[in-house]
Image: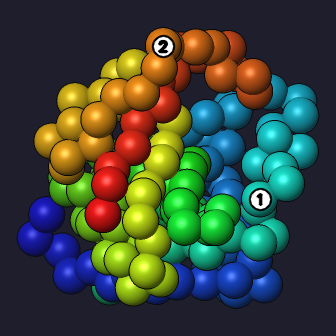
C-alpha cells in the first residue's frame, strides 16, 4: 500500500470509534438485526481499540485487544472491503502484537475464521484445539495462539 497510513489506539469515546464499529459490522454481522449487540459484547468497553487511518483520516481497518491476566486476546480485526489485501490487516496485527509485548503479555490468543488461518500462521500463530462454529455467526473458527 503506497498511501500514508497512521495507526491510533482509541477509546470507545473517540471520534473514529463508530467508523471502526461500522467496518466490523460490515465484515462480520452484515444484515444481522442484532449486529450492534454482537459488537457490544462483554469486552468491548474494556478493550484497547486500534484504527488504521489514511491521510484523509478515513478509517480503513480496526482491531481490538483485551487483556486477561498474562494473555492478550485479539478480536474483531476487520478491514474495509475496499482496502482488503493491501497489507493493512498485517500492519494492524503487528501493531496489536507490539502493544501486547509492551504490556508484558506472555501469550496472545485469537479466534480465526477458517479463511484467515494461513494469514495468522505466517505471523507465528499456532492452532489449538478443534475448529468450531462461532456462537455469534455460526462461521467456522479456529483458536490460535502465539507465545511471546
**Residue that label 2 marks:** 130
The N terminus appears in which quarter of the rendering?
Answer: bottom left
Q: Nearer the viewer, residue 81 or 67?
A: 67
Circle 1 SS class = loop
Nearer-N-terminus badge (1/2): 1
- What is the total number of numbered labels drawn onto the structure image? 2
Relative to residue 39, is residue 58 drawn left or right?
left
Query: Is residue 147 at all visible to an observer of this figure?
Result: yes
The residue shown at (66%, 54%) is: 22
Disc on res. 12: none
Name the spot of residue 79 as percent of width and height, x first. Answer: 42, 51
**Residue that label 1 marks:** 43
Distance between the Cα atoms at labels 1 and 2? 24 Å
Q: In the picture shown, does residue 116 fall above or below 105?
A: above
For the residue carrying disc 2, how many other residues have a C-alpha within 10 Å: few (<14), some (14-19), or many (20+)?
Answer: few
Q: In the picture shown, does residue 59 fall above or below 10?
A: above
The residue shown at (28%, 42%) is: 125
Q: Quadrant of residue 32?
A: top right
Q: Quadrant of residue 52?
A: bottom left
Circle 2 SS class = strand
Relative to residue 96, is residue 91 drawn left or right?
left
Amino acid at each position: 500500500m503506497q498511501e500514508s497510513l497512521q495507526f491510533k489506539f482509541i477509546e470507545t469515546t473517540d471520534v473514529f470509534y463508530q467508523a471502526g464499529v461500522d467496518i466490523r459490522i460490515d465484515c462480520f454481522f452484515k444484515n444481522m438485526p442484532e449486529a450492534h449487540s454482537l459488537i457490544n459484547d462483554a469486552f468491548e468497553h474494556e478493550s484497547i481499540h486500534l484504527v488504521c487511518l489514511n491521510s484523509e483520516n478515513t478509517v480503513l481497518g480496526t482491531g481490538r485487544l483485551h487483556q486477561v491476566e498474562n494473555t492478550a486476546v485479539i478480536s474483531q480485526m476487520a478491514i474495509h472491503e475496499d482496502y482488503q489485501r493491501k497489507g493493512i490487516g498485517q500492519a494492524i496485527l503487528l501493531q496489536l502484537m507490539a502493544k501486547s509485548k509492551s504490556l508484558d503479555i506472555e501469550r496472545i490468543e485469537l479466534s480465526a475464521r477458517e479463511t484467515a488461518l494461513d494469514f495468522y500462521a505466517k505471523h507465528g500463530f499456532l492452532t489449538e484445539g478443534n475448529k468450531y462454529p462461532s456462537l455469534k455467526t455460526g462461521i467456522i473458527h479456529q483458536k490460535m495462539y502465539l507465545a511471546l
